[in-house]
Image (spheres, helix red, strand yellow):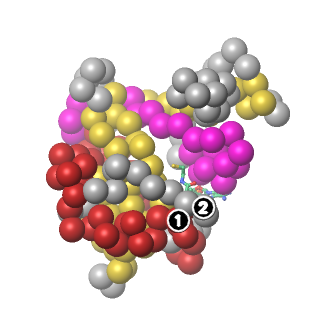
Amino acid sequence: MIIRHMEPEDCGAIIAVAAHWWGSSYTSDMFSSWYIRHFRDTCLVAEEEGRMVGFLMGFWSQTLPDEAYIRIVMVDPAARGQGIGRALYEKLFEQAIASGRTTVRCVTAPWKKDSIAFHTKLGFRIEPQQQELEGVPVCLNYDGRGGQRVMFARRLSR
Ligand SMILES: CC(C)(COP(=O)(O)OP(=O)(O)OC[C@H]1O[C@@H](n2cnc3c(N)ncnc32)[C@H](O)[C@@H]1OP(=O)(O)O)[C@@H](O)C(=O)NCCC(=O)NCCS
């Protein structure tokens, strides 16, 4: 497996697999050539024998110079459990440290138990909230529309 930066030309391949890999419809402005052009340095593709098997999209915070943010990660369901998700995250951690970032953040939906398990294994801690759902701290209005999210943070060290 190799990990490389995403290129604007990758957006068609990503759109083609996003719903299948996510498990339900997933459309986003992120899957566009303009987004990838501007965030290429923090968007990664995992490939096996020239075929995309996973991708990650993140960014360095402009407002918080110590922070990196991972917006989305998806791995081909046929290739899960083989360390591809971990490899994508660890590559971004490496780049984030080199860019002087000391914290990486991301969020997931409280019902995505697989994602919570994955992030916990990768060393993220769940940030405390005023409310808990089934024992998990959850931000109840993450997006101003009542969206619920588990908020993760992980310290980065050299
Ligand atoms: C979450 C996801 C990216 C994990 O990718 P993956 O390549 O299967 O994960 P890895 O094989 O690298 O696993 C890394 C660690 O997480 C653990 N893990 C991964 N999925 C897990 C699960 N469903 N349950 C428990 N642990 C899990 C692995 O055991 C592994 O631990 P280890 O390295 O200590 O052995 C993948 O399941 C996916 O694409 N899900 C759909 C999209 C999604 O939910 N994205 C996250 C929210 S943005």
72 and 104: which one is in front?
72
User: At x 38% / y 55%, what residue is drawn?
Assistant: 56
- Residue 99 at what x, y percent from top left? 21, 36
Q: Are marks 2 and 1 in contact (CB under 8 Å)?
A: yes
Is residue 141 visible in the rendered image? The answer is yes
Amino acid, disc 1: Ala
Mark 2 residue CB less than 8 A from any atom of ligand 1: no
| Image-quarter location of ligand 1 | bottom right
Q: Residues within 10 Å of mark 1 (few under 14, many from 20)?
A: few
Q: Say which residue label 1 marks.
A: 19
Q: Say left or right for 120 vs 33.
A: right
Q: Residue furthest right?
A: 134
Which comes before the other along the chain, label 2 or label 1? Answer: 1
- Residue 20 at what x, y percent from top left? 55, 70
Q: Residue furthest top?
A: 130
Residue 44 against residue 99 in the figure, above or below: below
